[in-house]
Image: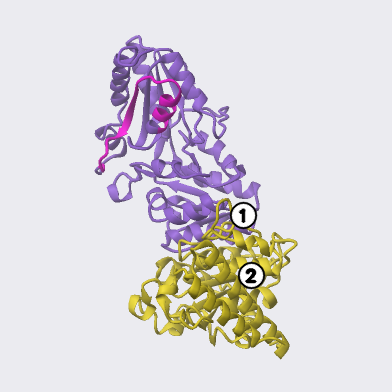
Amino acid sequence: MGELEHMRTAFGHALVELGRARPDVVALSADVSNSDFSYMFANEFPARFYNVGIAEQSLIDVAVGLSYAGKVPFANTFAFLLATRALEPIRTHCCYGRANVKIMAGYCGLSPFTEGPTHHAISDIAIMRSLPNMTVVAPADCEELRKLLPQVAEWDGAVYFRFNRNDVPAVFGSTHQPVIGRAELVGSGDDVTLIGTGLMVSRCVDAAASLAVEGISARVIDMHTLKPLDVETIVAAAEETGAIVTAEEHSIIGGLGAAVAEAVCDARPVPVKRVGLRDQFAGCGPYFELLDRHGMSVQDIVDAAHGALKLKGSAVAR
Amino acid sequence: MNFHSEALVRDVSRTAQRLRLDVLEMVYGAQAGHIGGAFSAAEIMASLYFHHLRIDPERPDWPERDRFLLSKGHASAVLYAALARRGFFSVDELATFRKAGTRLMGHPDRKVPGVEIVAGPLGHGVAIGAGMALALCSEVPKPSATSAPSGRASRARVYVLLGDGEIDAGVIWEGVMSAAKYHLGNLVAILDYNGIQQTGATADVMPHEPMADKWHAFGWHVQEIDGHNVAEVLAALDRSDEVHAQPSVIIARTTKGRGVSFMEYDNRWHGGVPTKEQYEQALGELQQGMAVWAS
C-alpha cells in the first residue's frame, strides 16, 4: 500500500490553485464547506464563494444560473445528496440543458465510514453514467486528483467528480499525467486484468502483487474516467488477457463493473468478475476494515481473479 | 416611474390577444399542449417582450440582454409565440409546435433562440435566476448588507415567470431564500396567480394564502396587481426596477383560460385540447377580444 494522503485536503488545495489560475471559477457549498473542504476556496476567494444553505437542489440550480452567465461553478456537497436529492435538476439542467456545472462529489463510497449507510454513496456512478451529456471522473489518488481537476474546469460540459473524504494510498508519482477519458495502465500483465476506480485502484495494485507471488501475471488498469469510457483499452485487455476483474467502492449494480461488462459483451466477451458492494447497505466502522468487511478487500480481488481465470477459456467460447 | 401612453397599453393589450390566438392555433394544431396557463400569462408576456425587456432578437446571446426565464415550462406555447412575434424566429415555425423534428417541443429546449433555460420540471426558475443574477453582480453582495450591492457587472436584469401551482415545490423557497440573502435587486419574479392547478383550485390542492405575506416574510419586495391590466403590469415592472437591495415579486392576479368564456376558471383547460367546435368558438371570442384593442 502506498503512502497515505488526505484526499479532501488535496482537493481543497487543488480548488484554490484552480481559483488562482482561472478567475471564472466560482464555488458553492450546501453548508458543508468545512466537510467538503471548499472552505479553503472560500477563505481565499470570499467574493467567489456562495453558501446556499442546506438546499441541494438550489445548490445545483444556482450553479446552473451562474454557468449560463459565463462562470465555471464548482458545486460541492456529499456525493449521496448530489446523486439523489439533487438529481432532477442535474438531469434537467446540467445534462439536458448542458449547463457547464462541475459537480464535486466528496464523501464517495463508504468514505464517511462512521456516519453509516445514510451518508454512503453506493449508487452514484450507476445513476450519473446513465445520464446523456454527463462525464464521470473518479481519481485513484491525490496526485491524480490534482492533475485531473484543472481538466475538469477545461472540460466542456457537466462533470461529476467523485472523490474520497479520507487518507488514501498513493498510486502515482509526481510525473503522472492522466487525461480525462483515457484509462491508465498501472501495471502490465497477460493472465488477467484488474480494472479499478477510485481508492480500489490501490487495492488492485496490492492484489496484483499477491497474484504475482502465485505466478499469475495481472494487468492493472486505473479507470479514473467512468464516462466517456475508454472502451478501446478494455477490449484490448479482454483480447490480450482473456479475463477481467473490476473493483469499485460502489454497488456491483450499474457501476464500473457493469460498464466494463457492457463494453466487453459488445465487443469481445470474456469472463468479468465484479468486486464491490453486493446489493446491500454497508455498516459502520474503521474505513479500511469496513471495505474489507463488505467485499472490497485485496483478498476479494484476488479471489475474483481466481474465479475469472477458472472461467477463462472454458465457459466462454474463444 | 415612466408614463405609459394609452397607445402603448392598447398595443401591448392587442399583442397579448395575438399571442392567445397563436397559442390556440398551436395547441389545436398539435392536439396537445397547455392553454389555460398560457392564456393567463398573455398580458405579462406581451408587456415583457413588447416593451419592458432589453433584448435584441438579432443577438439572442447578447451578454447585456435582460434574461427572461419561463419557470412554468408547460406554458411554452405563449413563450414561443412571444419569441416568434418579437422576431427571434419565424412565425411560420409556430405551426411545428410539438410535431416531429420540431425545436418547439412541449417543454422549452435551449436550442430555441431566446430560450434561456430548460423548463417543465417545475420549481427551478427562482434559484437558476438567482445564480444568473449573482453572476451579473461584479461582486458577491454581502449577506449582512442592508443596502444595495455596490457593484453590478452588468445592467442586465433577470425576470422569472412562476406559476402558482409551481410554488408548491420546496426548491422554489430554497431559491427565494438565496435571492433574499444576497440582496438580488436585479432579480424579479412574476407570479401568474391564476388560482388553478392541474387537478383543481390551488386553494384546495395546496393553499398559499397569505401569499403576499409569505414573500414579504422571505425578504422580497412585493407588489400585487391585476395581471390582465397592461397598465398595471408595465407600472409594476418599472417599479421593480427601482428596487435595488432586495429581490422583487409581482403577484399578478390572473384568470386561467382568460379570453375564452368556456375555458376560464376551469382546471380541465390546464391541459385540455379543444374540439373543432370549441376551437371555432374560441377563435371567434379571441378575435372579438382583439378587436376591442384596435387603434
Q: Name the residue: 38% across, 36% down.
A: A255
> Type of residue at label 1?
Lys
Q: Which mark is residue B156?
A: none
Residue sticking out furthest to the front: B277
Q: Looking at the picture, does residue B26 appear above or below residue A104?
A: below
Q: Colour of chain B?
A: yellow
In this figure, which residue is indicated by the disc labeled 2? B82
Q: Is residue A268 magenta?
A: yes
Quarter of the figure with residue B214: bottom left
State the residue in front, B93 or A85. B93
Instruction: Classify the position of the C terminus of chain B by image quarter.
Output: bottom right
Q: Chain of mark 2?
A: B
Q: Looking at the picture, does residue A192 appear above or below residue B86?
A: above
Q: Chain of mark 1?
A: B
Q: Is residue B59 left or right of residue B149?
A: right
Q: Spatial distance from mark 1 to mark 2, Cα to Cα? A: 16 Å
* Residue A116 appearing in the image: no
* Highlighted magenta segment, given as a residue range: A259-282
In this figure, which residue is indicated by the disc labeled 1? B111
Q: Position of residue A146 (x, y in %)?
A: 54, 38
Q: Position of residue A156 (x, y in %)?
A: 61, 44
Residue sticking out furthest to the top: A215
Q: Position of residue A136 (x, y in %)?
A: 48, 40
Q: Helix, strand, or loop for circle 2? A: helix
Instruction: Classify the position of the N terminus of chain B by image quarter.
Output: bottom right
State the residue in front, A44 or A77. A77
Callout 1 and callout 2 share a chain? yes
